[in-house]
Image (cartoon, grey):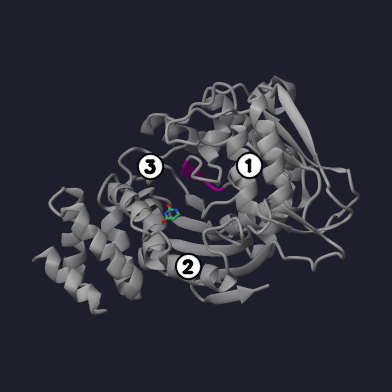
Amino acid sequence: MRMYDLITKKKHGEALTDAELAFMINGFVAGEIPDYQMSAMLMAIWIRGMDEHEIAELTKVMAASGDMIDLSPIPGKKVDKHSTGGVGDKTTLICAPIVAACGGKVAKMSGRGLGHTGGTIDKLEAIPGYNTTLSREKFMEIVKTLGVSVIGQSGNLAPADKKIYALRDVTATVDSIPLIASSIMSKKLAAGSDCILLDVKTGSGAFMKTIEDSIHLAKTMVSIGEAAGRRTVALITDMDVPLGQGIGNSLEVIESMEVLKGRGPKDLREVSLQLASNMLYLVGKGSPEECRALAEKAIADGSAFHTFEKMVTAQGGDASVLSDYSKFPQAPYKKDVVAERSGYITHMDAEAIGETSVILGAGRETKDAPIDFSAGLHLLKKYGDKVEKGEPIATLFTSKEDKLRESAKNYEAAITIGESAPAARPLVFARVEKTGVERY
Ligand code: URA
């Protein structure tokens, strides 16, 4: 078999066989297929696409390129969750303890921030002492006893994806549904859970800017999961507007704790409850309505918050910060951004707002740059809100005084204030299961 022939085949729009996909991925990981041939193949896939069987097989081979985690020693159904990435998306911190408090098992490996989007592991590391690199044994032990543990992704999880992603990043081939779906699902299959809940974000702060593209990506990932024997459901949720009010690591942990204590912003609470209910549905805790009631009860009776506290303690963190927020590192500099005119907020550019949080220090400008856990934004006014000229619309927090002016300008530019109130946007647009798509 020769890579040259496989590139030719895909260039003409033909499907690759299982054996050809295995040859290509295994050869690339082993260093036998050079980057330039793989780059040509990625562009051929970008242009010609792949059929459903090819995508499922590509994903399986990529998953098997490294560790395949065996969670079978943990009794009960394990459920994983994946978000395609957003701004202010802290739902894992809320859903994971809710599901565990209701008897589900969440053995979760999460990622760090990428570009303008935040990552769960960076948020958890804002909790003093929280260890995101546990041994496999300790991780499994915590899930067995508490029902939940969240750690960083192991270095050898789907190495084929790591290598291919690095090439896609520099060959303009990131935005391809077969490539995004196989990238995400290879890591989910390797992580070993029985069920997978996907949160496919849509809108200005998401990879997928339109609802139709988001549904197409969701359907592709659901069919990959189901073909691999994992029960998979996807929700299409809004990322045209940042989720909640806090953006930045400590701010997001605090806001998540507020939701777990029965308070917090309504949009974040609603999306988190819908995600948690679907995770409970996947592990067989009842009908969607029954699962929603269970999730609400876990917040109301404090069991979800206490589960999170126990997980933090088990992973070496100082759980007292979850009740006394003044123990989080405090940003030395803060500044209010005010409305430039009176009216209604008719648009928030979520990607630009995420980039503003990075400038303030909440994300990384370069791969290994440190994070300022205290940095970020608190959004005082959101999409649809009425504002008066000169009224504060957001507060910026940072340790870098010289970044305040630039960040305030960027934030102002990201907000559009119009004459009249815009139409309300749904928080969840659709639910995709193997049986079909339900639009809301
Ligand atoms: N997230 C991933 O893990 N892979 C992609 O290709 C896109 C988003």
Q: Work out whether residue 369 can be spotted.
A: yes
Q: Report x, y in % for residue 235.
A: 58, 63
Tell me the number on the disc at residue 398: none
Name the residue: 8% across, 66% down.
1
Q: From this view, report whether residue 430 is shown above or below residue 142.
A: below
- The mark that comes first in sequence, 3 or 1, is 3
Q: Residues within 10 Å of mark 1 (few under 14, many from 20)?
A: many
In the drawing, does residue 201 fall left or right of residue 29?
A: right
The overriding secondary structure of the stretch rendered in magenta is strand
Q: What is the three-letter code of the residue carrying label 2? A: Leu
Marks 1/2: CA–CA distance: 28 Å
In magenta, the rendered stretch is: 104-111
Q: Which residue is mark 3?
A: 73
Separation of marks 3 and 2 at Cα, in angstroms:
32 Å
The percent position of residue 292, horizontal first and vertical second, equals 69, 57
Q: Which residue type carries mark 3?
A: Pro
- Disc 1 marks a residue whose amino acid type is Thr
Residue 356: mark: 1
- Local secondary structure at mark 1: helix
Which quarter of the figure is the C terminus placed in? bottom right
Residue at disc 3, secondary structure: loop
